[in-house]
Amino acid sequence: MSNRFLAGLGRVYVALILVFLYAPILVMAAMSFNASEFYQLPFSFSTEWYDRLWRNNEILAAAWRSVWIAVIVTIVATSLGTAASVALFRYDFRGKKVLQVLLFPPIAIPWLITGTAMLVFFFGIGLGRGTPAVIIGHVALALPYVIVVVTARLTTFDRTLEEAARSLGASPWKVTRSVTIPWILPGIIAGGLFAFAVSFDQFVVSYFLSEPGDSTLPVLIYTSIRKGFTPEINAISTIIIAASMSIMLLAARYSNFGGER
Amino acid sequence: MAEVRVESLIKSYGTLKALNDVSLTFPDGGFFGLLGPSGSGKTTLLRAIAGFVIPDTGRVIIGEQPVENVPVEHREIGMVFQNYALFPNMSVADNVAFGLEVRKVPAADRKKRVAEALELVQLGHLGDRKPHQLSGGQRQRVAMARAIVTQPRVLLLDEPLSALDKSLRVDMQIELKRIQREVGITTIFVTHDQEEALTLSDQIGILKDGRVIRHGPPRAVYDDPRDEFTARFLGEANLFSGTPEDGGLRLRDGSLIAGTKAGKIAVRPENLEISETEPSTPNRLKAQLVQRVFGGAMGTCIINWQGETIKVIGRDQDLQGLSDTGPVWISWAAERTVELDA
């Protein structure tokens, strides 16, 4: 087989992957602009579903709730995760390896299991369901992502920079602020974007932990679909996808996904 | 500026004694070179003075003030690291200003002192650059400027020139010496390069296995190394051992080396004479020339004496008359015999 044939085959393969990934999304985005409620063709352009969405207070409230929960989760998980990463990088202590390993299962354990466990636990300690439980749950899910990303950035950090700063008279806090944090800032930003995405896109744990009147957007979309499908859902989903993809592209820019920037 | 003293420093890592009872005085305003093979404890000693290593026992005194319990940031030191450790996110001027900023020096004063420090290292025009835009030699100068701008009591240099290539290294040696003289700061530096130590220091200390085995002015230590390790580590040395007699040292080929009572002696390669005819010098040995190595201005002769390799270094023009191999005499003036402890 000639190299040209192989190269052509490779292009077809990549094209197929992209079609599989993006065709359903593109169809959904297109249908959110289609006038017909029942996906009827021919396509006729309309922003009716976006207008309706704009007047749907239930969806808007859920979207707003999702955003501010995600912001709180981002701030808390990024701060805790960064502090943990720096501590794990700087200090050697008993059980450090064990602790590092214990931080990762939340990524691997199915969210369904984590969500069930959290629900049982929060009822056990008397917190029950509700927004505080959702926030705590999201922080727990997002934390390992922040630690992974920030730690990856820290491995490229030269410790003698901290020593140099101390030799010049800087207190440990000043060293962290002026030398360490500027270096790992891209990692912190990427970790924060991950944390935001984990919280904003979270369905399973939110579904388990939120109270019926207090749904986040993914939970509301799920329950709406069960009641009956409307193209408004296409519209809000298109908006969410656009937002999520922007965040991921930003995260990829700040972490070194796909090689050196 | 201050005298630095360490007394009975001991630092163990598990069973390894990185510092094994080290006591030394680093004179005020002096340039002190710590020299030793890797693992000898020289870097540990430097880091103990800086405060990055906390000794198990012993004292570190900077300018009459005991500092064992003073953290690094309050020891008033300046340090230059092997890789320079310039802050990559700051400009050259901001790097130099860092120590002043920490000390809350007012902005106007800060600017003036940064400019002076950069002028001293001849980088006055590069203040706006980022470290990654500088050459190795320029980074070295920035690191120096950053370390001295705070007027520390002592300047610590950890293998400061090892990252530079050879020709640049010689230039920087001269430069380091000039800066140190101009500032007059007590300087302690660590190196594994004996030539660098001899060139820069007015005092050297030789470490081995966590102990200081010899210290003093470079020439004194070089001319009278006293023990085999120092003789071999600092420069090159041809060793001879035998049985001490009334008249001198009887070597195993029967020759008598007059005027020494030691059982072991050393002769520097540059102090050996080589000739094909028997010289009149009393200290002479019959040997075999194995190889002549051309090295530009200086040449080396590899000689076999009683199965041992002897090196002779001389000006190439003085060695040109010799045949490439064959029987030769090596000899040396009696005052060039270096007596070693057995």
Image: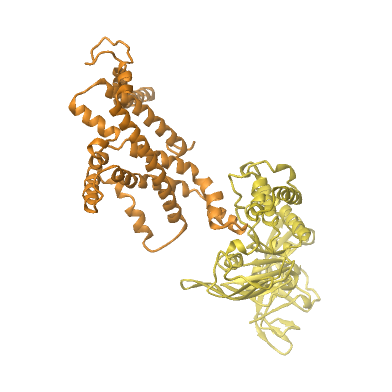
Residue B268: x and y, percent? 72, 70
Residue B337: x and y in percent read 74, 77
Which residue is drawn at the image coordinates 78% and 79% (left, top)? B282
Q: Position of residue A116 (x, y in %)?
A: 21, 46
Does residue B272 show up?
no
Looking at the rendered image, the quarter that the N terminus of chain B falls into is bottom right
For image coordinates 33% across by 18% down, the residue present is A51
The image quadrant that residue B213 belongs to is bottom right
Of A209 and B321, the residue lying toward us: A209
Colouring scheme applied when the structure was drawn: by chain
Name the one closer to the observer, A156 or B77: B77
Is B105 left, or right, of A141 in this rendering? Answer: right
- Looking at the image, residue A13 sits to the left or right of residue B202; the answer is left
Closer-to-camera residue (A150/A257): A150
Residue A30 placement, left or right of B185: left
The number of callouts visible is 0
**Extreme residue toward the bottom, this view:** B246
Give me the chain that's yellow.
B
Which of the 4 image quarters holds residue B265? bottom right
Q: Is residue B254 above or below residue A153?
A: below
Give the colour chain A carries in the figure: orange
Residue that protrudes farthest toward the left in the picture: A227
Image quarter of residue B55: bottom right
Say which quadrant the C terminus of chain B sits in: bottom right
Q: Is residue B338 visible?
A: yes
Name the residue: 36% across, 47% down: A143
* Camera-nearest residue between B237 and A180: A180
* x and y, in percent, of residue A182 in the image: 53, 45
